[in-house]
Image: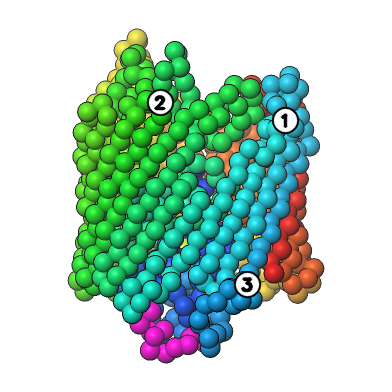
């Protein structure tokens, strides 16, 4: 990234978000929220520290430095002034410019109904996905609806204080729009000289307190993120405006700051889809995909009610911050995970019962170039299971070009959290002990380095792991070289090895399953309006005496701006060849606005994608995306109701976005 005039959104997505390819659901949530922030950027002339901390590269110290500079040089005239903020390096300034703008300062900041509507901004978003094939679920009548997928959303904002949105979605195979979400929010309202309403939200929202051990339905950065994984505590509330139909709260929340003390309260009543146990007296697991295509899937609609209530107190003493969080969740039916067979015994300590309590204390202490941060939490369930979890980090930034970080986590097997998501290998902060070391550096003006090592121990059983404890190692190194203003090279090596069950001569033992990936990418700017990106991926999976499973892919992506920004074209061609599904290759591909652009490829296939964005008038963007995939070694695609009786599939997506 070092040499280009400014990092593009596509480059940011590939470098910062999709390094964590294998954790698809969380990566999609990260993408959704950062994409929303990119499309609705923060005005630096009115930004608060809380708003700036939403940007992944910004620390508490840097947010304070930006605001201090702004207050001394108010109003800021351009984003170029960020170069005068000494704690920001060039790469961080480039990323910040993807999420911030400078707007003209209004002389009269008083709030009246007339000004709220006069200064309001609106956005209408419509999208339809059209498949040129028929899945088996449509052929045999198992799916209740047609193959179309539709999304609608309206968003309102005004004066940086008032926000509202409503969205609805129909997935393929569903009958009608069965997902409806929305919110109304007041933000950053001064109620006195030393007091402020940080947020009041009614509707669907996300909450993030501490480091996520007790409650985090918002962004949780993975190990592969170049951004500091754990930079701050208590990010507060944010609206849920995406089409991801899970991991959010529905109800009300308020966060109020008086001098150095901030108090937060929230409540939620969610209706969920659960999988019944054999006698329908409890729930074995909760569906999170939001799909209700078949009669069976639809029969589970809203069969489980969840009540949540919680609060947080945050004390800010400049260098030192401390936070207390309490969270309680209750289900209308008890969770009864299957754990009565050798294959399901790993679920013994999974959430069970219908009542769940979490309490945590978090801290952050900045002293010069050093920073300490952490959270410790306790959990208690209605089945009398008590657990403990702690996450603590040490960060050293000797200069703006280098950042070293040590993270130590110990999540007990009995620790239970319903809405907690923290820095971890597992999907939940449970059954995991590890030491993580990372180094981010700009060695020279043209060479950036990012590397980490994660040493893991799992004290209890896991799926496919019948012995305990088990161990794992995760290591990644990435170098980005930009020799000039037109070329950029990136090389990444990633190895992850974890113990799994291996059966030999009817005996089961733990053996290391190792996955190694290599990615090489070259970006060349042939013209100010024409960029080409060539990417090669390789993968090798080894497991005990089994033969290695190999895979590779090569892709070419061409981005062309035509007719002075009136029309933008993005074309991608991908070839993939893997021995097995396990050796699938992940790759970023061009997508429409708000669309998740990562996909996995396997077996032998060729895939082509064309995206066109047309802006005929100010505020109106009409987009289309056509994709076609042809498998060279298979006559069908998918299985079960998702089966396509053809070796190829093609899709068309149409999208309209109007801002006024």
Residue 197 visible: yes
Residue 470 pos. (x, y %): 26, 30
Residue annotated with mark 3:
117
Left or right: residue 32 compared with residue 199: right
Residue annotated with mark 1:
145
In this orientation, which residue lies closer to the viewer: 36 or 326? 326
Q: Secondary structure at mark 1?
A: loop
- Can you say whether 608 is above or below 260 in the image? above
Magenta-drawn segment: 67-77
Residue annotated with mark 2:
333
Which mark sits nearer the N-terminus, 2 or 1?
Answer: 1
Residue 595 pos. (x, y %): 62, 51
Left or right: residue 219 compared with residue 325: right
The tag on residue 387 is none
Q: Secondary structure at mark 3?
A: helix
Which mark sits nearer the N-terminus, 3 or 2?
Answer: 3
Q: Alpha-carbon neighbours of circle 1 within 10 Å: few (<14), some, or many (≥20)?
A: some
Q: Secondary structure at mark 2?
A: strand
């Amino acid at each position: 990234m070092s040499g280009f005039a400014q990092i593009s959104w596509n480059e940011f997505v590939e470098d910062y978000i999709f390094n964590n390819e294998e954790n698809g659901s969380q990566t999609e949530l990260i993408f959704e929220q950062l994409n929303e922030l990119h499309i609705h950027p923060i005005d630096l002339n009115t930004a608060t520290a809380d708003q700036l901390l939403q940007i992944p590269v910004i620390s508490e110290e840097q947010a304070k430095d930006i605001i201090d500079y702004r207050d001394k040089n108010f109003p800021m005239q351009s984003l170029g002034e960020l170069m005068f903020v000494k704690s920001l390096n060039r790469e961080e300034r480039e990323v910040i410019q993807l999420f911030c703008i400078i707007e003209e300062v209004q002389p009269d900041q008083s709030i009246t109904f007339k000004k709220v509507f006069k200064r309001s901004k609106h956005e209408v978003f419509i999208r339809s996905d059209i498949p040129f094939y028929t899945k088996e679920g449509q052929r045999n009548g198992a799916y209740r609806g047609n193959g179309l997928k539709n999304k609608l959303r309206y968003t309102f904002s005004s004066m940086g204080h008032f926000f509202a949105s409503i969205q609805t979605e129909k997935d393929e195979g569903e009958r009608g729009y069965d997902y409806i979400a929305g919110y109304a929010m007041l933000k950053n309202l001064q109620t006195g000289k030393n007091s402020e309403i940080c947020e009041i939200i009614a509707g669907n929202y996300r909450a993030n307190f501490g480091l996520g051990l007790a409650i985090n339905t918002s962004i949780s950065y993975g190990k592969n993120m170049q951004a500091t994984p754990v930079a701050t505590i208590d990010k507060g509330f944010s609206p849920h405006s995406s089409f991801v139909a899970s991991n959010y709260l529905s109800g009300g929340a308020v966060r109020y700051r008086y001098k150095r003390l901030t108090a937060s309260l929230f409540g939620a009543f969610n209706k969920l889809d659960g999988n019944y146990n054999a006698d329908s007296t409890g729930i074995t697991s909760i569906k999170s995909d939001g799909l209700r295509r078949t009669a069976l899937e639809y029969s589970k609609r809203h069969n489980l009610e969840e009540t949540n209530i919680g609060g947080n107190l945050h004390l800010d003493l400049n260098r030192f911050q401390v936070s207390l969080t309490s969270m309680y969740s209750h289900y209308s039916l008890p969770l009864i995970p299957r754990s009565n067979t050798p294959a399901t015994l790993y679920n013994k300590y999974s959430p069970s019962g219908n009542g769940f309590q979490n309490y945590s204390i978090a801290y952050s202490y900045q002293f010069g170039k050093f920073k300490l941060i952490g959270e410790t939490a306790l959990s208690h369930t209605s089945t009398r299971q008590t657990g403990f979890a702690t996450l603590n980090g040490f960060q050293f930034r000797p200069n703006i070009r280098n950042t070293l970080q040590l993270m130590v986590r110990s999540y007990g097997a009995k620790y239970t959290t319903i809405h907690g998501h923290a820095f971890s290998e597992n999907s939940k902060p449970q059954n995991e002990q590890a030491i993580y070391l990372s180094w981010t550096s700009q060695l020279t003006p043209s060479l950036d380095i990012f590397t980490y090592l994660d040493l893991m121990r799992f004290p209890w059983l896991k799926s496919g792991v019948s012995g305990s404890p088990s161990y794992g190692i995760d290591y990644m190194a990435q170098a980005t070289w930009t020799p000039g203003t037109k070329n950029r090279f990136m090389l990444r090596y990633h190895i992850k090895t974890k113990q799994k069950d291996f059966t030999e001569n009817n005996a089961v033992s733990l053996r290391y399953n190792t996955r190694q990936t290599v990615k090489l990418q070259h970006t060349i700017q042939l013209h100010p309006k024409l960029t080409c990106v060539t990417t090669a991926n390789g993968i090798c999976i080894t497991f005990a005496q089994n033969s290695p499973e190999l895979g590779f892919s090569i892709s070419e992506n061409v981005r062309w701006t035509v007719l002075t920004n009136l029309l933008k074209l993005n074309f991608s061609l991908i070839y993939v060849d893997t021995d097995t599904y396990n050796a699938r290759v992940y790759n970023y591909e061009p997508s429409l606005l708000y669309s998740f652009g990562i996909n996995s490829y396997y077996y032998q296939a060729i895939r082509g994608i064309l995206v066109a964005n047309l802006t005929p008038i100010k505020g109106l963007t009409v987009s289309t995306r056509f994709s076609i995939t042809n498998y060279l070694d298979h006559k069908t695609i998918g299985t079960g109701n998702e089966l396509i009786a053809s070796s190829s599939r093609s899709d068309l997506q149409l999208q309209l976005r109007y801002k006024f």
